[in-house]
Image (cartoon, helix red, strand yellow):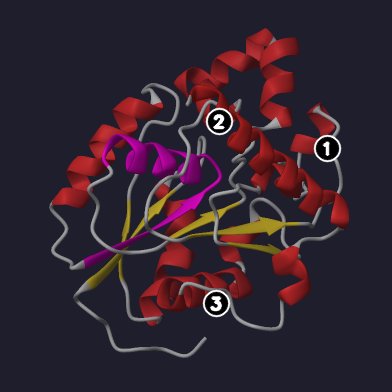
Amino acid sequence: MPSRAMDASEAVVLVPGLWMPGASLSLLARRLSRCGYRCRVWTYSSTLRSPEQNARRLAEQVRILPAARVHFVGHSLGGLLIRQLFHDFPDQRPGRVVTLGSPHAGSAVAERLIRDRRWLARAFGRSVPGLTGAVPPWEAAQPMGVIAGNRNVGLGCLFAPLPRPHDGTVAVAETRHAGASEHLVLPVSHFSMLWSREVARQTCAFLRHGRFESGHAAARTGESGVMRRAGEQEQRRRDRGITDSD
């Protein structure tokens, strides 16, 4: 990944996922720094505070960043928290957003554990609404790019059947969101994407240009017609909801 001179006018805020420490994003942050961004990893309590509370705390931290443009990168639950931020505090500075393995359509693994293993469900704490799909719509002007993995290595698939392809924890179909401008699938698992050079390179590309790099057209447009149709059906449902409320 070629290095660029640091641009003091642009910052990237990285948000880790459920149960993950800020250190989990340190390597990705270093690689994004080589792209010329000043990176800040934001840590938070993913289980003791609600998404709304965490979004408020994140907004307070972002507000004091000395940058003209602020980008966001969120892994898993972190991507959903970024959605909550933009819904609750839409007056954000220009920038772009990349989510990594975030279950925008809800997590089948989380839903199964919450339903069938109540003793383990307590470990999810107050993060449950986001993981089960109760996340505000994406209506921000900032472009959002989604990176998903299709290397099915992880403990998640031991707790609930996941439709292939998946990253061991989140199905590719669960990462899709009608509001995203691009969707890219890479051969990484849910956690190895944090250390993947290719994920870092594609994240840099989207933050810089608003699109992923060429050479992944097939992955960007979807793995199959089934996935594309699922996205089209979701959009039609959204359209019907708008019509019914008018």
Say above or below: 88 vs 221.
Answer: above
Q: Earlier in the sequence, mark 3 or mark 2?
A: 3
Say above or below: 116 vs 23.
Answer: above
Q: Residues within 10 Å of mark 1 (few under 14, many from 20)?
A: many
- Quarter occupied by residue 156: top right
Q: CA distance from mark 3 to mark 2?
A: 40 Å
Residue 122: horizontal and vertical position, in percent? 56, 14
Q: CA distance from mark 3 to mark 1?
A: 28 Å
Is residue 130 toward the left or the right of residue 37 in the image? right
Of tags 1 and 2, the one toward the viewer is: 2
Q: Amino acid at mark 3?
A: Arg
Q: Earlier in the sequence, mark 3 or mark 1?
A: 1
Q: Which residues are magenta?
A: 69-89
Residue 1: horizontal and vertical position, in percent? 52, 86
Q: Residues within 10 Å of mark 2 (few under 14, many from 20)?
A: few
Is residue 194 toward the left or the right of residue 3 in the image? right
Say which residue appears at 71% left-offset and 76% top-offset: 216
Q: Nearer the viewer, residue 178 or 201?
A: 178
Say which residue appears at 81% left-offset and 37% top-offset: 157
Q: CA distance from mark 1 to mark 2?
A: 33 Å
Residue denoted by label 1: 162
Is residue 64 toward the left or the right of residue 108 in the image? left
Residue denoted by label 3: 201
Say which residue appears at 67% left-offset and 56% top-offset: 148
Residue denoted by label 2: 243
Q: Amino acid at mark 1?
A: Leu
Contact (Cβ within 8 Å) of mark 1 with mark 2: no
Which structural element holds mark 2?
Answer: helix
Q: Is residue 70 magenta?
A: yes
Q: Amino acid at mark 2?
A: Thr
Q: Earlier in the sequence, mark 1 or mark 2?
A: 1
Which structural element holds mark 1?
Answer: loop
